[in-house]
Image (cartoon, helix red, strand yellow):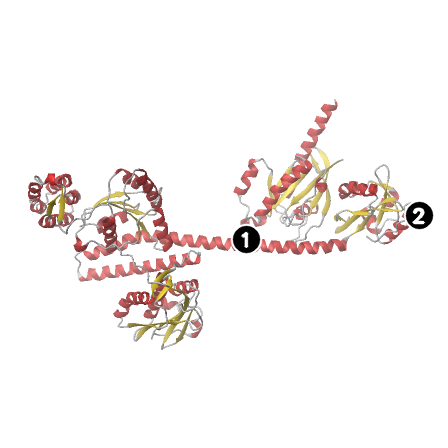
Amino acid sequence: MINKKICMVGAFGVGKTSLVARYVRSIFSDKYQTTVGVKIDKKVVQSCGAEVTLVLWDLAGEDALTTVKPAQLKGASGYILVVDGLRRQTLEVAIDLQRRVTEAVGKVPFVCVLNKTDVRETWEVKPADLEPLAAQRWALIETSAKTGAGVGELFQTLTDAMMQEHNATDSTTGAVAG
Amino acid sequence: MPPIPQPGPSQASRGTAETAAAVLAAMQFAVFEPMPNGKFRLFSAPPEWLQELMPDIAEAGECDLADRFPLLEAFLPEAEEAWQKGAERVSSELWTETRPQGGDIHLQAWAVRAGGRPILAIEVADVLYRERQLTLQYAHETALQFETIQRLNLQVQRAAQAKSEFLAMMSHEIRTPMNAILGMADLLAETPLSSEQQRYVAIFQRAAASLLDLLNDILDLSKIEAGELKLEAVAFELRDVVARAAELVGIRAAEKGLAIESEIAPDVPPWLSGDPVRLRQVLINLLGNALKFTETGKLTVRIARDPEGSDPAALRVGVSDTGIGIPQDKLETIFESFSQADSSTTRKYGGTGLGLSISKKLVEAMGGRIWVESTVGSGSTFYFTAKLGVAEARPEVAAEPMAAAGGVRAPLRILVADDSEDNRFVIRAYLKGTPYVLDFAEDGAIALEKLKTRAYDLALVDVHMPAMDGYTVVREFRDFESAHGRPALPVLALTADAFKEAIEKSLAAGFNRHLAKPIRKAALLQAIEGHAQAGPEPAPAGEHEVVVDEELSAIVPRFLSNVRKNPAAIAAALARGDYDTVRSLGHNMKGTGASFGLPQISALGDRLERAAKEQSADSVLAANSELAQFLDRVEVRYR
C-alpha cells in the first residue's frame, strides 16, 4: 500500500478545508469555520495503476500570527497552494508559500488552485496575474469547492504527478541497486 | 493537562506511573507507553473515544500510533527529545480527526514522564479547540470583512471613474461636431438672409448654445464627482465677481423686464482670496435659476458676513427672487442631480437641473453649505456660505494682450492642425477676409513635420488628434526649437476642455494659450492678434506705414504703381468669370510682394490665387477689396 502525504496550504479563508471536504466527503458548507492546527483526512485513490492512500494534511490558513511550520510539511510528497480568486493578496501568500515549502521539503509536485470559480465574475485575480506563474510552468487549476468543479481533477493531477515521481524514484533506486 | 503525581528521582516505580495513568484515564486520556520497537502499548483501559477511532485497540496491545494519527509523525521527535531530557511535559498542536460515524474530533497529545518513565497521553481537546477557533475566527472574519469593504470601495471608485471618463469622452466627442454646428450657424448669420431665415438661424444658434450649456454642466459635474475639482486661491475683488455675474444674467433678465440688484454689507472685506471663477459660477447658477422662475419683480444678491462664522472672510450669500416659489416637500431634493421640483419643470422652464447640484458641490468645496427658503407664490431665497480668505494686498493686474486696433492685421502665416475636416473648414471660414495665410495639417505627425520644416508666425493645434496628440506635438516642437536655437513660435491649443486642469496641462506642455471649443470667431481673431503681437515679428511702425530696406527704394515705387492696376483688372476679370486671369495676377503678387519688402501683397496675392482656384467670387471680391484698400493707404518708409 502506498501512502502519500499532501499538504493543503494557503492564506486563511481560501477554502482549503472545503476543498478536502468536497473531495473526501462530497459535502460543502457555506459557513466559514477557521481551522486550528491541522485537520487530517485520508482517501484511497487509483493512480498509475496503483492504489494510493492520500493522507491530506489540511494546515491552518496563514494569517499575521499563524505560519506553516516545517515540521508539518515534513514527509510531504506533494502540496496544494490554494488561492481565493476574490482576494488578490492570497495569490501573493501562495507565491511566498511555494518558496518556503520548497525550502522545507525540496522540489516536490504541487498544484496551485484558484478556488471560488462559482463567483468568477467578481474575481480580483486576473489572467495577467497568472501569466508569470504559467511561464514558470506552475500547474494552475480552477475549482469551486461549492459546486465541485475542478476538485476531482485537482487531486487526480497532483496524485498522478506524485506517482510519476514515485515510480521514477523507484526505478532510479533500482538502477543504482542493480 | 492536570499535574501528574511525580515520584522522587530515585523512587521510580511502575506503581507511581500506573497511578498517574489511572488519573489520566479517568479524565478520558488515552495513555500509551513507547516500546523499543517504535510502537506504543496502551497503558490503561482505552477511553470511549479511542475505541471509536481504533475499535481493535484493546485486543491489539501494541499499535503503530503514527500510522493511525499521522499528526504524531511531526510530534514524536519532539516528544522523544523531551523524554530524553526529562522535561516535565510537552504538547503537540491541536489536530482534528474525522469520527467513523461522521463529525470532527479535536485531539492533543502530551509527552510526560511519570515514575521516571515516558508516557504519551492523548486527550480530546474540543473545548480548547472551540476557544481558539472562536478567537481566530473572529480575527479572520473581521479581516475578511475589511478586505470586502476595501474591494467594494475600489469597485465603486473605479465605476465612478469609468463613468466620469465616459462622460468626459462623450462630451468631447459631442463638442467637436458642435464646434462645426455653432461655427456654421454664426457664419450663416453673417450672410444676407431674409427675416424668416434670420429667425431660423437664431433658433439654430440658441438651440446649439443650450446644448453646449448642458454639455458643460455634465462635464463639470462629472469632474467634480471624480474628485478632480481644484479650487484656486487667488486674490479677487468681491464686487467685481458679483458685478460680472449680474451683468451676464442681466442681459436675459432685461429681456424679461427684471432688474438685478446687489448689496454687499460694509463689513465684508472688499478683497478676498479664493476661486473667483467658481464663486461667479455659483452666483450665475443661482441667478439663472431665479430668473427662470420669475416673471415679474426683481432678483437680489445680498452678501454679508456669515453670522455663524467668526472669520471675516466667511460669507453668507443670499439670492432672492419674486418668482413662483418651491413647495416645502421639494426643498430637500432640489440640490440633487436631475431633480428639478417637477419633471414638467424642465419642459416648461428649460435648464438641465444640474446647476444647483454643481453649485452645492462647489459651495461644499469652499467649506460652506447651500440651502433654500421659499414660499410658494411669493419667491425663494437661495443661501450659501463659503469660507474664503482675506487678500492682503490688491494684486497687480497683468495687462491682457489687446487686439490690433482698427482691424488692420499683419499677414501672418498660420498653421492649423486639426483632424476634423469640419473644424478646419470652420477656421478657414472664420479667417476668410483676413490677410492670414493658412496652412493645414490633418494630424499631429504632419503638424510636427510642417512646424519643423516650414516658417510660420503662429500655429493653432488641436489637442486631441489620433496618432500624435497636440501635447506631444508642442512638446517635441519646443525641444526642436531650443535644439536649433529658434525663437519660440506662438502655438495656441484648441480643445473641447475649458477647465483649469486642462488649461494647466496645455500650458505645461508648451502651448502659449488654450482656446476652448466651440471657438467663436471673435475669440479666435482676438487670440491670434494678441499672440501675433507678442510674437517675434516686429509690429508695423504706423497704421499704414511699411518699412522697407533703403536699397529697394529705386524699384518699390514702380512695383507699387504696377500692382495698383491689379484691383481694377481683377474686378474686370471676375465680372466676365475669367478666374484664370485672377489666379495669374494673384500668383504674381504672391511671388513678388515679399521680395519688395511688402509681404502683405504676397499674402493677398496668395488669397486671390486660392480664391480663383476655388472659383469663389465672394473670396476674390473680399481679397481684392482688401488689396485695393491696402494699396490706397500704404505709405512706404525706407531704412
Q: Nearer the viewer, residue B256 or A159?
A: B256
Where's residue A150, x and y in %? 62, 43
Q: Position of residue B589 (x, y in %)?
A: 13, 41
Upstream in sequence: badge 2 or badge 1: 2
- Where is residue B243, by image quadrant? bottom left
Q: Which residue is mark 1?
A: B151
Residue A168 percent coordinates (x, y): 68, 29
* Number of the label disc, if any, that sits on residue B294: none
Q: Position of residue B415 (x, y in %)?
A: 25, 44
Examine the rendered structure and indicate whether residue B83 appears above or below residue A33.
above
Q: Which residue is mark 2?
A: B15
The residue at the point 55 percent across, 38 percent down is: A132
Chain holding disc 1: B
* Amino acid type of the residue tagged 1 in the rendering: Arg
Q: Nearer the viewer, residue A174 or A103?
A: A103
Which of label 2 and label 1 is nearer to you?
2
Of all chains, the one bearing label 2 is B
Q: CA distance from mark 2 to mark 1?
A: 64 Å
Secondary structure beneath label 2: helix
* Residue depicted at 13% across the width and 46% down the height: B546
Image position of B30 (left or right of A119):
right
Seen as rendered, the residue at the extreme front is B393
Location of the C terminus of chain B (image quadrant): top left
Residue B168 shows up from this direction? yes
Tell me which amino acid carries mark 2.
Answer: Gly
Q: Residues within 10 Å of mark 1 (few under 14, many from 20)?
A: some
Q: Is residue A84 visible?
A: no
